[in-house]
Image: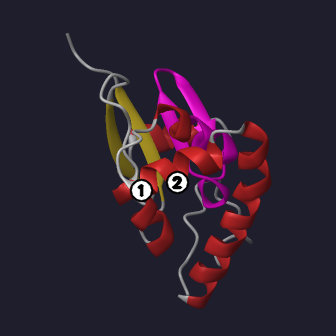
C-alpha cells in the first residue's frame, strides 16, 4: 500500500522558512512529507495559483485534495507533526490551537517579509500582480 504524499510548499530562498521546513517532521502514520520549493514550477504551484493563493503571504500544506494556507497550514502541520525533538514539540505546543495560530502567523509572516526585504529578495509573485515583485 502506498503512503499518502503530503506536500509542504514554501519559499526556499527564505532562510527562516527553509530552517523551519528542514526541522518539521510528521508522524509516520500520517504519510510522507515532501518539501516543495515554491520558486520552481510544479503541478502543486499551478494548483495554488489557480486557487488564488498568494504564496508570498503564506505557506501551503496539501493533504489529499485539500490545500491548507498560512495559519491553517501551520496549525494542521502541528496537529500531524511528530513530537520527537524539542523543536517539533515546541511547534506542536505553539500551533496546536487554531486561534493561537491565527494570532501568531501574521507576526511570523511580517518578520519573514522584513527579513526578505533586508536580504533584497524578490517575491515569487505567483498571482502575477505587476506591482508586487519586491518585499
Image position of 23 with respect to 118: above or below: above
Q: Which residues are magenta?
A: 53-76
Up/down of 123 relative to 56, above or below: below
On the image, numbered disc 1 is attached to which residue?
86
Identify the colour scheme used. secondary structure
Identity of the residue drawn at 59% across and 41% down: 73
Quadrant containing the N terminus is top left
122 magenta-colored: no
Task: Let me know if residue 73 is in the magenta part.
Answer: yes
Callout 2: 10 Å neighbours few (<14), some, many (20+)?
few
Q: Residue at x 30, y 29 (%)?
A: 28
Q: Secondary structure at mark 1?
A: helix
Quadrant in which the C terminus appears = bottom right
Where is residue 65? Give x, y as percent. 51, 21
Q: Is residue 97 left or right of residue 61?
A: right
Q: Are marks 1 and 2 in contact (CB under 8 Å)?
A: yes
- How crowded is the residue under tag 1: few (<14 C-alpha within 10 Å), some, or many (20+)? few
Q: Check the image and name the residue furthest to the top.
A: 1
Q: Residue at x 22, y 16 (%)?
A: 2
Q: Is residue 89 visible?
A: yes
Which corner quadrant of the image does residue 53 belong to? top right
Q: Which mark is residue 5?
A: none
List the residue tagged with mark 2: 90
Nearer the observer, 30 or 57: 30
Secondary structure under tag 2 reads helix
Q: Position of residue 130 (x, y in %)?
A: 70, 68
Residue 135 in view in this figure: no
The image position of residue 98, as x and y in percent, is 73, 38
Q: Is residue 32 left or right of residue 15?
A: left
Question: Quick check: 9 above or below 106?
Answer: above
The span from disc 1 to disc 2 (Cα, nearest Å) is: 6 Å
Amino acid at each position: 500500500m502506498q503512503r499518502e504524499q503530503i506536500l509542504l510548499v514554501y519559499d526556499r530562498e527564505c532562510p527562516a522558512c527553509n530552517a523551519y521546513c528542514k526541522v518539521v517532521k510528521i508522524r509516520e502514520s500520517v504519510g510522507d512529507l515532501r518539501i516543495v520549493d515554491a520558486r520552481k514550477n510544479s503541478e502543486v504551484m499551478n494548483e495554488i495559483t489557480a486557487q488564488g493563493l498568494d504564496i508570498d503571504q503564506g505557506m501551503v500544506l496539501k493533504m489529499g485534495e485539500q490545500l491548507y494556507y498560512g495559519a491553517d497550514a501551520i496549525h494542521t502541520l502541528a496537529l500531524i507533526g511528530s513530537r520527537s525533538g524539542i523543536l517539533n514539540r515546541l511547534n506542536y505546543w505553539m500551533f496546536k490551537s487554531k486561534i493561537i495560530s491565527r494570532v501568531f502567523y501574521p507576526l511570523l509572516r511580517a518578520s519573514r517579509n522584513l527579513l526578505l526585504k533586508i536580504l533584497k529578495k524578490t517575491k515569487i509573485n505567483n498571482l502575477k500582480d505587476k506591482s508586487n515583485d519586491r518585499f
